[in-house]
Image (tube, rainbow, N blue to C red):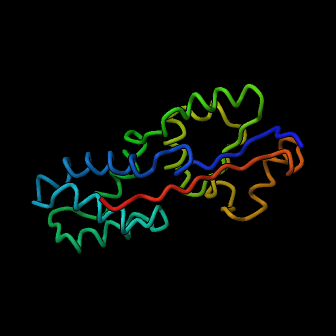
Amino acid sequence: MTISAVLFDLDGTLLDRTTSLRHFLAVQHAKRIAPRSTCPLDLYQQLFLELDQNGHVWKDIVYQQLIVHLQLEGVTVSELLHDYISEFAKTSVLFPETRHMLEQLRVSCRLGLITNGRSDLQRAVINHHQLQTFFDPILISEEVGLSKPNPELFLRPLIHWELAPENVLFIKIRREYSHF
């Protein structure tokens, strides 16, 4: 059996989501929270990460709960959500050596990307890190109307590449954040 292609997940596999969130939340806290509240950054970050449940809770709900729990006044869910949608990608970071690994792999394998999530957010991250130069296809759940773990989503790249499942490897690493 020969591996001819590799499919990657994005969040937690290529993208260091927790570090990216911490970077983003530090910027958001400095811009939106600190001028209006005495809420410390570490508490803001910790509670966001807990409420976010590793990306399984949409941010409007996270921000609603955050505002109530931390008793934040003078800031709205829509204001914080707009920040998240428009700014998260700019503070996002890949895991170390990700680009080098992808450069090495693309010499001998076809590469594809499968990720769940909102298209605008995932595309912004992909574009920010120029990941589109490595992957064909890039499948985002919102765009294709399927989400992981639906097997049909994984079969699409195989059909595109005309490869059998035994010739394709899917890599998803689940890195959970630790409480700080």
State the image coordinates of residue 73 (x, y, percent, origin top left): 15, 66
Residue at horizontal 66 percent and vertical 62 percent from the top: 148
State the image coordinates of residue 109 (x, y, percent, origin top left): 77, 33
Q: Quadrant of residue 105?
A: top right
39 is higher (above) or lower (below) than 71 = above
Q: Quadrant of the C terminus?
A: bottom left
State left or right for residue 165 relative to residue 55.
right
99 is higher (above) or lower (below) than 25 = above
Nearest to the observer: residue 71 or residue 143:
71
State left or right for residue 41 relative to residue 62.
left
Q: Quadrant of residue 178?
A: bottom left
State the image coordinates of residue 96 (x, y, percent, origin top left): 48, 35
Q: Quadrant of residue 69?
A: bottom left
State the image coordinates of residue 43 (x, y, percent, origin top left): 22, 61
145 is higher (above) or lower (below) than 69 = above
Nearest to the observer: residue 7 or residue 86:
7
State left or right for residue 40 relative to residue 168.
left
Q: Quadrant of the N terminus?
A: top right
Residue at horizontal 35 percent and vertical 54 percent from the top: 82
Total labels: the figure holds 0
State left or right for residue 110 relative to residue 42.
right
